[in-house]
Amino acid sequence: MTTSATSETPLIEVKPALNIAGLAVGYGGVPAVRDLNAHVRAGEILALLGPNGAGKTTTLLASVGALPALSGTITALGEPLDRRVEANARRGIILVPDSRGVFHRLSVDDNLRLARRKHGPSVDDVFDYFPALRSMRSRRCGTLSGGEQQMLALAKALLCAPKILLVDELSLGLSPIAVEGLLPRLRQIADDQHMAVVLVEQHIELALSIADTAVVLHHGRSVMSGSATELRGRRDMVEAAYFGSVEEPSGDRTGVPERQ
Ligand SMILES: Nc1ncnc2c1ncn2[C@@H]1O[C@H](COP(=O)(O)OP(=O)(O)OP(=O)(O)O)[C@@H](O)[C@H]1O
Ligand SMILES: [Mg+2]
């Protein structure tokens, strides 16, 4: 079963793969994200939206254990998040950073070989999602286009057999056409692999078109959250939330907030 944006609410409540509750996280003891509640289930995509500096990357870093929570909790795959990134990665909590995390001097093949795990998927398995990479195996990664490098970054992440995949600005520096090609691939992966995905994305419409749920952050706080379908129907509110003109009511964290 796939849990797409259009599917009906499941009869059985499925526990979130990743659950963020009352999270405060930041730098040097100063919170950049405050009182954040968000969750994503296996097979679902949560879009984390918001303007520059809103706290999206900070939230992803906390979700893989790279930044310690100042308060609140993060539960991943039924257990509290480990404080060590490597331990979380071994459990399948994998971040694709906005810097892409590819080695420019190495070939595509070598990049993939380095990411491969003993009992994880094969390179051929991940080529099924990104067939264009097959013909580039011997090319130095630095010679690939931005979109091809992003495919490689995602392919590397898939080799780690993620159960929770966190993707930071896949579209950074890419043309809209390249983004339009990549994001549906992510939807397919989430569906096929029953993978929970947290997607940070600046292309709001595209992100909402493949996501199940979304949270809009502004100045480190959630100012809007709900189903992607709801948010797509309220683009005016989403844009207002980007500018901080709406505030999420504290009682209801799942619906579209009322205009303040
Ligand atoms: N290493 C750091 N030290 C101190 N402050 C930081 C650090 N990294 C980020 N910040 C601050 O934390 C806040 C949130 O930053 P973050 O990178 O999470 O935003 P973002 O939503 O990912 O923005 P963008 O869309 O520009 O990537 C910002 O005010 C930023 O200046
Ligand atoms: Mg960022």
Image (tube, rainbow, N blue to C red):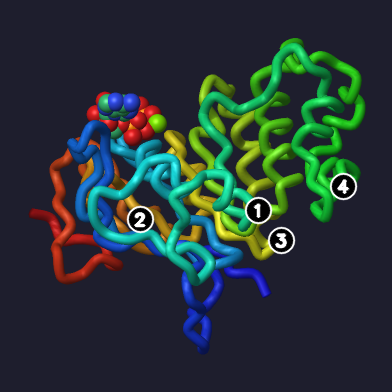
Q: CA distance from mark 3 to mark 4?
A: 14 Å
Circle on res. 122: 4
Circle on res. 193: 3
Q: Tell me the crowding category of disc 2: few under 14, some 14 to 19, or many 20 or more residues within 10 angstroms, Cα based.
A: many
Residue contact between numbered discs 3 and 4, judged by CB atoms under 8 Å: no
Q: CA distance from mark 3 to mark 1?
A: 9 Å
What amino acid is labelled 3 in the image? Gln
Q: Tell me the crowding category of disc 3: few under 14, some 14 to 19, or many 20 or more residues within 10 angstroms, Cα based.
A: some
Q: CA distance from mark 1 to mark 4?
A: 13 Å
Report ligand 2 position as a quadrant: top left
Which residue is at a point 52% across and 82% down the rendered structure image? 10
Say what secondary structure mark 4 lies in. Answer: loop
Q: Position of residue 38 (x, y in %)?
A: 35, 60
Residue contact between numbered discs 3 and 1, judged by CB atoms under 8 Å: yes
**Image: 11 above or below 160:** below
Q: Nearer the viewer, mark 3 or mark 4?
A: 4
Ligand 2 lies under 8 Å from the Cβ of mark 1: no
206 left or right of 130 in image: left
**Image: 213 above or below 173:** below
What amino acid is labelled 4 in the image? Ser
Say what secondary structure mark 3 lies in. Answer: helix
Which residue is at a point 83% across and 50% down the rendered structure image? 118
Q: Tell me the crowding category of disc 4: few under 14, some 14 to 19, or many 20 or more residues within 10 angstroms, Cα based.
A: some
Front-most of residues 3 and 59: 59
Residue 39 visible, this orientation? no
Residue 27 visible, this orientation? yes
Dot placed on the residue nearer the N-terminal end, 1 or 4: 4
Q: What residue would you read off at disc 1?
A: 162
What amino acid is labelled 1 in the image? Pro
Q: Residue 36 sits in which quadrant?
A: bottom left
Q: Nearer the viewer, mark 2 or mark 1?
A: 1
